Image (spheres, rainbow, N blue to C red):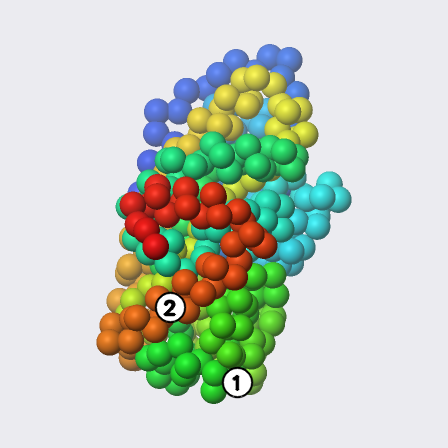
Amino acid sequence: MKLRLAFTAALAIAAAVIPGVVSRPAAAEQAHVLRIATLAPAGSSWMKVFNAWNLTIKKETNDTLKLRFYPGGSQGDERDFVRKMRAGQMDGASITTTGLGQLVRQVLVLSVPGVFDEYDELDRVREALSDRFAGMFDQEGYTLLGWGDVGKTRLFSMERVERPADIKKLRPWAWKDDLIFTEFLKVVGANPVRLGVPEVYPALQTRMVDTLPASALAAVSLQWYTRLKFVSKRNSGIIVGATIVRKDKFEALTDEQKKVLVETSARAHAALNRSIRRDDDKSYQAVLKRGLAEVDTTENQAEWEEVGREVRQRLTGRVYPKSLLDAVIEAAGGGE
């Protein structure tokens, strides 16, 4: 998890987060440090923007508010982040829907296949439903600071996968707490190897795992691509994440600190998403240049769509209500 990927554009993104910073009076303001865990590797696009975000906050609050990030899975996996937030050992986390779903189960609707696979669709969903999801987190005792991207979901493998049935003969990794891909594998008839993110690279080395869903950026950042040979050309969705903090920690801030945190978070996450989308596209081209073979599943797209439809139907009413699924699909501009 400590392996790093250098991104040449990250410094420009960092500069975009903190231009025109104006120091604000901090007399009598109490100093606060928010401890935030993330799987993002140190030196990655995520961490360069997060570090710039922290610098901005420190300057705008005269050092009365700071963000202390714990990158690279140093605090464990996302399930550990959730446990530590609940225990008061962490104040917040920047996590994917897999972790978010342990706090608000319904947010997993953003990960089901066939809901959206392009960024403009995701942006429309966020614009239309962000307040609704923020309210769900608020009820559970958390404040949603901003949405983030992790890149487009692709299938990486050691063997060529052209249709869903091909996965049955492989050893696919499923994140321990990923209900969506696990359900996908059940529909396909495949047996998942359930592991935490820190365990994936060693499992690839020993061939305990030979297939996994990931964005190209994550596969490069975590060096997973070095142990695989094929990657799907079509993406099945977009990996969504968000940064949250405990509501009591947010409410303990002064009004000025809250204002700065919210305003800088919006700028930081906008910069982060621009960076991630660009770097994910670059990473996809990079893995192709480094020898991974591109698999075009277009001829069998009807089979993939049918599996996705079955996954959505199975999870509706159990993980999220049909009304929320319909709202997401409508906002994305799609349909059944």
Q: Position of residue 68 (x, y in %)?
A: 59, 41
Q: Residue at x 44, y 26 (%)?
A: 263
Q: Quadrant of residue 157?
A: bottom left
**How many neighbours does mark 1 have within 10 angstroms: few (below 14), some (14-19), or many (20 or more)?**
some
Whether residue 289 is visible, yes or no, is: no
What is the spatial separation of the Cα atoms under label 2 and label 1, in whole angstroms? 29 Å
Image quarter where the C terminus lies is bottom left
Front-most of 336 and 98? Answer: 336
**How many neighbours does mark 2 have within 10 angstroms: few (below 14), some (14-19), or many (20 or more)?**
few
- Specify the farthest residue to the right: 87
Whether residue 193 is visible, yes or no, is: yes
Q: Amino acid at mark 2?
A: Glu
Q: Residue at x 56, y 76 (%)?
A: 192
Q: Residue at x 46, y 59 (%)?
A: 312
Q: Position of residue 126 (x, y in %)?
A: 39, 40
Q: Which residue is mark 1?
A: 207
Name the mark on residue 324: none
Q: Residue at x 40, y 83 (%)?
A: 166
Q: Position of residue 80 (x, y in %)?
A: 67, 55
Q: Amino acid at mark 1?
A: Arg
Front-most of 233 and 206? Answer: 233
Front-most of 330 and 159? Answer: 330
Q: Considering only order in the chain, which callout, 1 or 2, is on the residue closer to the N terminus? A: 1
Q: Which residue is mark 2?
A: 306
**Left or right, 249 with reference to 162:** right
Above or below, comparing residue 48 to residue 292 in the picture: above
